[in-house]
Amino acid sequence: MRRLIALTGSCLAILHGPFPSSADAQPLFGNEIVHFAQGPALVNSVAVGSFRIRLGQTTLAQVMSALGPSKVVETGDAGDYLARLCYQSADPSNPTYLVLESNEMGGSEYVMGFQISRGDARRDADLPCAALQVGAKGIVVTPGLELGARQRRLLARFGPAQADSCGFVRYAHGRGLGRTEADEWTELSVLDLEFRADTLVWLGAWKVISR
């Protein structure tokens, strides 16, 4: 599997490669080279109320039809292209932010990844966020994987990470999905977690299927 690294001071920035990313949310790791462990994606979707957004299947247009209009912000081109769509929970104070992303492999159409955070620590001033009708508790990835979760509990649940340093933990998985006469299909996925004082404060998940 691909190993993706770039030096940034005392830590290594693990680049997303085929995955969407934004500079303000780029995870940093210690002196480790991240590899893709064999296995399925740990996260395949995120639900907002009764609407479930499935990575690689749900379009940005379907999201806006279900959750309400929001501005799609596009940056970069070719391999650096990224389309982002932001929503914030209906909590009157300290809202939760959900950023949905599509890269070149998503054709600026399909949601390939998402980020969840709270407060202004990871807010991008250039990315406007539309208000949701649901509160933070209505944004659900999978039971137990939520902002405020304890690090020990999550690490015990997901097992050894592929990288763990500088407050970030990365799970990177890959698996073959079979082949046709001409192509072999592969699923690559990443789950990034940021902890502060043993508490989850940010998470990002991405998944691509390539040939």
Image (tube, grey):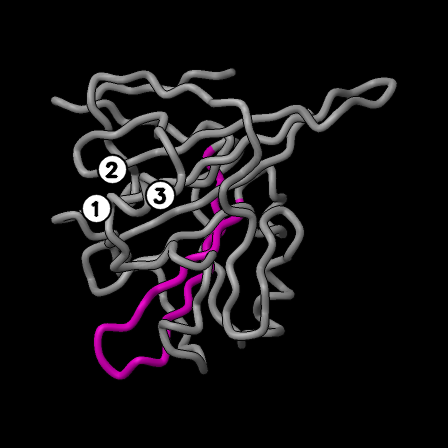
- Viewer-closest of 180 and 195: 195
Q: State the image coordinates of residue 102 (x, y, percent, origin top left).
A: 53, 47
Counting residues from the N terminus, which is met first, the one under dot 2 or under dot 1? 2
Q: Do the residues labelled 3 and 1 touch (CB within 8 Å)?
A: no
Residue type, mark 1 in image: Phe
Q: State the image coordinates of residue 112 (x, y, percent, origin top left).
A: 55, 46
Q: Under tag 2, what secondary structure?
A: strand
Q: Give the range drawn in magenta.
A: 80-102
- What label sits on residue 195 in the rendered view? 1
Task: Judge from the rendering whether residue 107 lies leftward or rightward of residue 121; answer left or right.
Answer: right
- What label sits on residue 178 in the rendered view? none
Q: State the image coordinates of residue 178 (x, y, percent, origin top left).
A: 75, 24
- What label sits on residue 168 in the rendered view? 2
Kindly identify which residue carries mark 3.
22
- Viewer-closest of 80 and 46: 46
Q: Which of marks 3 and 2 is in front?
A: 2
- The mark tally for this picture is 3
Counting residues from the N terminus, which is met first, the one under dot 3 or under dot 1? 3
- Viewer-closest of 128 and 7: 7
